[in-house]
Amino acid sequence: MKDMRVWEAALATSAAPYYLPPFKKTNTGTMYVDGAVFANCPAANAYAETQALWPNHAASLDLLVSLGMGRQAKRHHGGLQKFIPNGVIHTFTNVLIHQSNSNELWFKLIDQLLQL
């Protein structure tokens, strides 16, 4: 990663599936996609990494910052329901909301950390 240029990192971290293609680093052939594919709320991953790196000091967390992008209001997809069987849109929407609800993940992490 030390040979990654700023513009390459920007393309790599912006490569959200369905919106932008994966970024391929030409000299290594490595493919990169948006980090939210793996962790939509990476604060929990960062905390787990501190536990792995410093197991004796992981519980003494002083500050954890997570910069979010807000959340999107639920939308009604009435027009599509004429063409798609009942329940498919509802199920698919619920899966997407569950997978992309970083606010909920953040608050769960905070609750867990406060119990330490």
Image (spheres, rainbow, N blue to C red):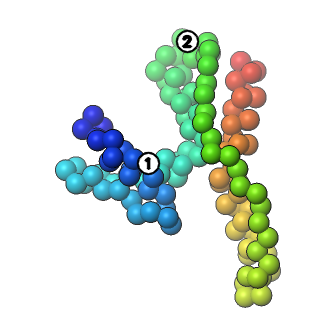
Q: Percent x, y for residue 38? A: 52, 48
* 88 relative to 7, above or below: below
Q: How many marks?
A: 2
Which-is-in-front pick, marks 2 and 1? 1
Q: What residue is pinned by disc 2? A: 57
Q: Secondary structure at mark 2?
A: loop
Q: Percent x, y for residue 51? A: 54, 22
Q: Residue at x 70, y 68 (%)?
A: 92
* 78 relative to 59, above or below: below
Q: Secondary structure at mark 1?
A: helix
Q: Determine contact: label 2, label 1, CB under 8 Å.
A: no
User: What separation in Å lies between label 2 and label 1 (alpha carbons)?
Assistant: 30 Å
> Which residue type carries mark 2?
His
Using residue 44 as the reference point, say whether residue 9 is left or right of it.
left
Using residue 17 as the reference point, say whether residue 112 is left or right of it.
right
Q: Residue at x 65, y 54 (%)?
A: 99
Residue 65 sits in quarter: top right
